[in-house]
Image (spheres, rainbow, N blue to C red):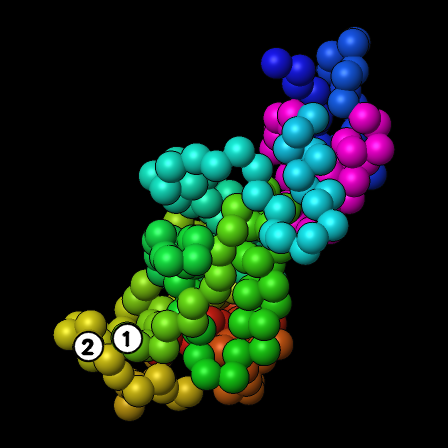
Amino acid sequence: MNTVQATEIPGSVTANTPSVTASPRAVTATTTTVTASPRAVTATTTTVTASEAKQSMDPTGSPPRFAPRDDGQDLAHAWTLLDSLTDPEIPVVTLRELGILRDVRAGDAGLEVVITPTYSGCPAMGAIEDDVRALLQANGLQGRVVTQLAPAWTTDWMSDAAKDKLRAYGIAPPHACASNASGAASVVQFASRSAKPEVVNCPQCGSANTTETSHFGSTACKALYRCLACMEPFDYFKPY
Ligand SMILES: [Zn+2]
């Protein structure tokens, strides 16, 4: 079997096999598809066979799909790929860590990637859907994005790792939402459910001596705070 090991380096392709039997044109065409998504080029290695490369150039318009594998393998592959997708607005945390990526399942027409918006009207959701589609397509997986609105997303779905990363990034992570213990479908709150003022610790120095300067920060899901100890302004990811 003639194979070409193609290592994905943005803008270039390296053929490791000295005797290249696949048409260079076919390899170039495949690479164009792969690098269509700037997010997808993070150091993954793809094995492209000559026939697969030819298939991806199929002018009949059928979606590119490499050697078919069973659903279990496709699902595991998709999870691995999607695990690298970060939030367009907070690039240090992944969609999975934020609780936006809910599920990857086998549907009738390929994989179904289930995502739940952080709140209705979040401008990042369009970009997230595009990122998911581009990543699947670039890796030869057929699938679609399913937006699931209920149960509504809550900051309680955020992993502890995500909260630590937010803090290190300079964003105070959300407090737990005690009133959402049921986990049932609930109305997304734009303001804090708590009547008493929250104590938000400064992500820079840890001081609790902070004050809210604006209920809406760089994005609608954050409030703008100021630390009265170190005087630094910072974003607070509001709990919903
Ligand atoms: Zn501070």
Q: Nearer the viewer, residue 60 or 187?
A: 60
Amino acid carrying label 2: it is: Ala
Q: Residue furthest left?
A: 182
The secondary structure type at the circle numbered 1 is loop
Is residue 49 visible from the viewing direction of this image? yes
In the rendered view, would you say 168 is above or below 221? above
- Asked if the beta carbon under badge 1 is closer than 8 A to the nearest atom of ligand 1, the reply is no
Residue located 55% across and 57% down the image: 132
The part of the image, by quadrant, that contains residue 150 is: bottom left
Residue under label 2: 184
Compared across the picture, whether 138 is left or right of 209 comes to right
The x, y position of residue 63, in whole percent, is 61, 52
Quadrant where the image shows the N terminus: top right
**Residue that lies at the very extreme toward the front in this rendered image:** 60
Q: Residues within 10 Å of mark 2 (few under 14, many from 20)?
A: few
**Residue plotted at (39% across, 88% down):** 191
Q: Earlier in the sequence, mark 1 or mark 2?
A: 1
Cα–Cα span, label 1 and label 2: 6 Å
Q: Position of residue 225 (x, y in %)?
A: 53, 77
Q: How many marks?
A: 2
**Segment colored magenta:** 23-49
Q: Residue at x 55, y 65 (%)?
A: 129
Q: Does the magenta-highlighted stretch encompass residue 32? A: yes
Closest to the observer, 81 or 97:
81
Q: Classify mark 2 as within 8 Å of ligand 1 or not, answering yes or no.
A: no
Instruction: Give the residue at mark 1.
Output: 151
Q: Is residue 193 left or right of residue 119?
A: left
The residue tagged with tag 2: helix, strand or loop?
loop
Q: Is residue 141 above or below residue 178?
A: above
Give, as a three-letter code, the residue at label 1: Pro
Give yes or no for contact between labels 1 and 2 (Cβ–Cβ under 8 Å).
yes
